[in-house]
Image (tube, grey):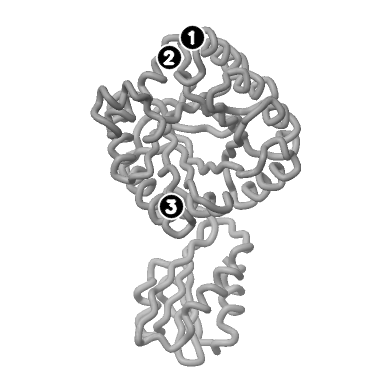
Amino acid sequence: MNRRKTRLIKVGDVEVGGDSPISVQSMTNTNTKDIKSTISQIRELERVHCDIVRVAISDSEDARAIKEIKKHISIPIIADIQFNYKLAIESVKNGVDGLRINPGNIGSNSRIREVVKACEERNISIRIGVNSGSISRETLDKYGGVNENSIVYSALENIKLLEDMNFNNIKIALKATNVPLTIKSYLRMAEFVDYPFHIGITESGLPWNGTVKSSVGIGALLAMGLGDTIRVSLTGDPVEEVKVGREILKALDLLEEGIQIISCPTCGRTKIDLIKLAEDVEKRVSNIKVNRPIKLAIMGCAVNGPGEAREADIGIAGGKGCGLIFKHGEILRKVSEDKLIDELIKEIEKM
């Protein structure tokens, strides 16, 4: 797939846009001023390879907490600001790596200029985020309600406020809860600007349905070459957001690392408890460090399994009380069911 060409910006030491890898973000759900809890959650996000984290800044105590939090984490941190320009400036002074703020929401040009000046002095980027619920009444009336035009032109108004001050260190987010509307909005915005896109489906829901909606929306945009950093928005543990985001990238061959598991659905030919087998394998390999991407197949049928999963680097295929271990479709050996996972792990560790 041909990726949209954008300008390159940085959030801390993470590059966004250009030819840089697509990064995965999340947002803490702790009170930012609860420094211990916020650090603990960010470390959990780091453990699952989150690239950038965002925190809510509701008051000065939150903004001041950034300074201490940054001492204990290793990924860039973005301050999420709603309307208070002073909190944006205070967050910048306390070492934040990026801002999420809409210039049109913070008041006069003089206030916007103060924020811009603070960001310029420290080379901090600003993310302009417009979603379907944050469009002004005037824009809604002008473009006939919530649609791709009202979302895009609302964002363009905010972009112009910064461009008029010669500030271009920008990335853009255009989110809706509706997947087709989100896709249309990003496609429309791509006609106007070359700023990098932060993509996601806002308020997508609880982990099960939210994962489906996010995968469809984010996956479709990435498949069209749109998107430079992503966030899966789930009502749940932020760690799950990162896991889902990374799996979306892996599914599109936009991230190649670790062990990727593929497994067949069960059918009448299956003579082994394939669901439990796949779950057990997933747990066993989750902490194995590999020096190259490995595709692992878990197949239920020893007759067709190795052939159907020929593209896998290694795999197992179940039988009645036994199973086969294979590499690239070629059978290595037959082992008893109780030793199948142990023998598989030995082969992976050799790789």
Whether residue 36 is visible: yes
Question: x%, y% of residue 90?
Answer: 66, 20
Q: CA distance from mark 2 to mark 3?
A: 34 Å
Q: CA distance from mark 2 to mark 1?
A: 8 Å
Q: Splitting the image into 4 quarters, where does residue 337 fall?
A: bottom right
Question: x%, y% of residue 230?
Answer: 46, 42
Q: Which residue is mark 3?
A: 248
Question: x%, y% of residue 65?
Answer: 72, 31
Q: How many marks?
A: 3
Whether residue 250 is visible: no
- Foreground mark, 2 or 3? 2
State whether residue 181 is above or below residue 47: above
* Nearer-the-camera pick, 304 or 106: 106
**Residue at point 57% right, 38% down?**
52
State whether residue 223 is above or below residue 174: below
Residue found farthest to the left:
144
Residue found farthest to the top:
110
What secondary structure is found at the residue carrying circle 2? helix
- Foreground mark, 3 or 1? 1
* Nearer-the-camera pick, 294 or 28: 28
Q: Which mark is residue 89?
A: none
Tell me whether circle 2 and circle 3 mark residues in contact (CB < 8 Å).
no
Label 1: few (<14), some or many (≥20) within 10 Å? some
Q: Which residue is mark 2?
A: 161
**Residue at point 47% right, 73% down?**
315
What secondary structure is found at the residue carrying circle 3? helix
- Foreground mark, 2 or 1? 1
- Is 39 on the left or on the right of 262, as rendered? right
Q: Give whichever of discs 2 and 3 has the lower sequence position.
A: 2
Q: Which mark is residue 109?
A: 1
Q: Amino acid at mark 3?
A: Ile
What secondary structure is found at the residue carrying circle 1? helix
